[in-house]
């Protein structure tokens, strides 16, 4: 909470107090006050305001310590505040300045609070062994002058040369499927390279071996006593997601059915709001997923495709983190594939590993430890954005005509399989084979995988029309592996969600284009060791 803000809102506390039956306890996951309070000399008063609001509850409040608590206070001081919820006999490690503990809030349930800054340079005297050990670990992984900076220092080419598994350079034995050179014909300026392990920054921290040993004993006890355990700690990373911006510098209009209002010009303002929120996250989000249809198809008719795209990319360019783009039908109404490869929407550029066909905008990367992002090209097989004389176009037209005899190929009426329309697309066998190899690698390396595509892959995360042509083939690949956690898509502006029989979450985000100007449609997702939340 910035010190200049009014007292914190009591809305959450009021809701918890009004629950019937009342809540049993509250978890405050850290960063209760903002770091600027220390510079303003207002840390104590800001904390007092937060604790006064939480003190209105008649149930225990369990606190995690975040980086902002440690910007404001030393560990020795935090032990003396109301944020030291380990007090009162809760069992923790021998080091009482390690804010880790466990308790049993009800029968056969255990809460474990972890101290994710037990090993950290924050809140600790610079001459102490704790500080010196944390600084040594940090310096081993982060050579930057600014230890909060996750960017590399040696330049893009040098960083990839030093780490062949990231380079995709010809002849590099990356160990990853599909690694190869894939620079666009006229690439945009490359982004700054990232540290090999970009989470080694000063605003993150880690766990001492003593805390991990203690944690292991707690879980062993819970196993023996058939308890379920809730673990409370700071998220590993966070990312932003947005879909179907469909910007055009045009007056409001309606969808193809003439029923749903579309806010073409306002969509850019809503994107700016999303970017501002992501930039203000503390710590900042690690990356952003743009799920396709960034500009509207009418820009092509108006001769404004290039300028509309430039405006969208300028807003997204205000972020200091990678933005991963899916290609949707509206990108392909405006540009050919060959042209898209030359734009800032070609986020496969810069060495990301993908299929052999460099015009297939599918690739994978690892944004964090034991986490992999796979971007799929749901229009790899499509009649959009492709020369009519090309084999890609002819094969897509053949598949579409087999399923859709209508004069208007965008019309699903009367079809047995109504998703076989021209505004959808599908996956080539080459892309599916590549996808299978990526997931096989993630299985073998115990990674969790996030999949993104413009078009939904599951009928229950769709309306039955907005669905990839060969969604069954894509699902077969996913279900043959155990690593995929979720599939994120756009295209269907209403949004949808389902949890499939294999435990994979399918989330279709609502479209910005049909979101009224006084609202918004984007998400920030927090990734923990055992869950994702948003």
Image: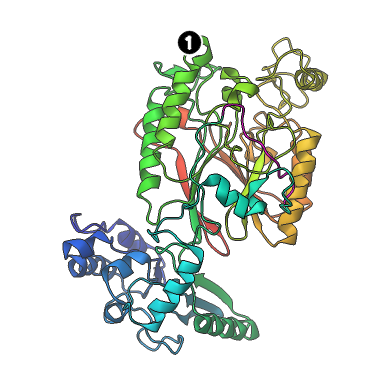
Q: What segment carries the magenta color?
A: 176-186
Q: Is residue 180 left or right of residue 512?
A: right
- Label 1 residue SS: helix
- Kindly identify which residue carries mark 1: 302
Residue 341 position within the rendered picture, expressed as x and y whole percent measured from the top left: 61, 28
Residue at the image position 44 percent from the left and 62 percent from the top: 201
Q: Position of residue 78 (x, y in %)?
A: 29, 77
Q: Percent from the top left, x then y, of residue 456?
A: 65, 37
**Magenta-span inclusion, residue 407:** no
Residue 177 lies in the magenta stretch: yes
Total residue callouts: 1
**Residue that appears at 48% across and 51% down:** 286
In the drawing, does residue 294 fall left or right of residue 405? left
Compare residues 135 and 396 and report the one nearer the observer.
135
Residue 98 in sight from this viewpoint: no
Q: How is the image coloured?
A: rainbow
Q: Residues within 10 Å of mark 1 (few under 14, many from 20)?
A: few
Residue ID at (25%, 65%) = 50
Left or right of 346 in this view: 12: left
Q: Indicate the quadrant where residue 339 lies.
A: top right
Type of secondary structure dominating the magenta stretch: loop
Residue 55 higher or lower than 148, as above or below: below
Task: Decide if residue 151 is in sight here.
Answer: yes
Residue pictured at 71% horizontal, 52% vertical: 174
């Amino acid at each position: 909470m910035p010190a200049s803000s009014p007292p914190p809102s009591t809305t959450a506390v009021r809701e918890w107090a009004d629950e019937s039956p009342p809540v049993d306890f509250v978890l405050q996951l850290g960063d209760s006050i903002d770091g600027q309070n220390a510079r303003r000399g207002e840390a104590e008063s800001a904390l007092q305001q937060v604790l006064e609001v939480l003190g209105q509850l008649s149930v225990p409040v369990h606190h995690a310590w975040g980086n902002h608590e440690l910007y404001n206070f030393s560990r020795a001081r935090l032990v003396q505040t109301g944020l030291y919820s380990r007090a009162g006999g809760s069992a923790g490690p021998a080091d009482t300045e390690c804010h880790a503990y466990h308790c049993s809030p009800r029968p056969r349930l255990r809460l474990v609070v972890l101290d994710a800054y037990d090993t950290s340079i924050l809140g600790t005297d610079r001459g102490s062994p704790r500080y010196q050990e944390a600084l040594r670990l940090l310096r081993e992984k982060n050579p930057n002058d600014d230890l909060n900076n996750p960017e590399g220092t040696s330049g893009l080419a040098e960083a990839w040369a030093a780490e062949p598994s990231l380079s995709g350079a010809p002849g590099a034995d990356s160990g990853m499927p599909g690694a190869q050179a894939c620079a666009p014909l006229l690439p945009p300026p490359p982004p700054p390279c990232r540290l090999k392990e970009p989470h080694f920054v000063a605003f993150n921290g880690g766990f001492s071996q003593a805390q991990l040993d203690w944690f292991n004993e707690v879980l062993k006890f819970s196993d023996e006593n058939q308890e379920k355990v809730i673990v409370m700690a700071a998220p590993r990373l966070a990312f932003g997601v947005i879909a179907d911006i469909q910007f055009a510098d045009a007056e409001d209009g309606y969808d193809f059915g003439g029923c749903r209002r579309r806010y073409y010009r306002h969509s850019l303002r809503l994107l700016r709001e999303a970017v501002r929120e992501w930039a203000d996250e503390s710590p900042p989000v690690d990356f952003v997923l743009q799920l396709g249809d960034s500009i509207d198809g009418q820009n092509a008719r108006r001769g404004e495709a290039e300028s509309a795209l430039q405006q969208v990319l300028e807003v997204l360019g205000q972020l200091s983190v990678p933005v991963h783009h899916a290609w949707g039908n509206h990108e392909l109404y405006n540009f050919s594939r060959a042209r898209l490869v030359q734009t800032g929407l070609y986020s496969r550029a810069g060495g990301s590993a993908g299929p052999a066909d460099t015009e297939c905008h599918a690739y994978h990367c690892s944004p964090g430890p034991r986490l992999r992002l796979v971007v799929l090209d749901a229009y790899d097989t499509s009649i959009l954005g492709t020369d009519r004389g090309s084999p890609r176009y002819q094969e897509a037209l053949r598949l579409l005509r087999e399923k859709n005899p209508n004069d208007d190929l965008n019309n699903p009426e009367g079809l047995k399989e109504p998703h076989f329309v021209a505004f959808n697309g599908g996956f080539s066998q080459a892309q599916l084979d590549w996808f299978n190899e990526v997931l096989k690698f993630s299985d073998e390396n115990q990674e969790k995988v996030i999949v993104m595509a413009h078009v939904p892959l599951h009928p229950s995360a769709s309306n039955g029309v907005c669905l990839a042509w060969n969604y069954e083939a894509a699902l077969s690949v996913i279900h043959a592996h155990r690593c995929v956690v979720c599939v994120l898509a756009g295209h269907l502006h209403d949004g949808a969600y389902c949890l499939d029989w294999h435990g994979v979450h399918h989330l279709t985000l609502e479209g910005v284009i049909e979101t009224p100007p006084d609202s918004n449609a984007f998400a920030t997702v927090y990734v923990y060791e055992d869950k994702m939340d948003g």
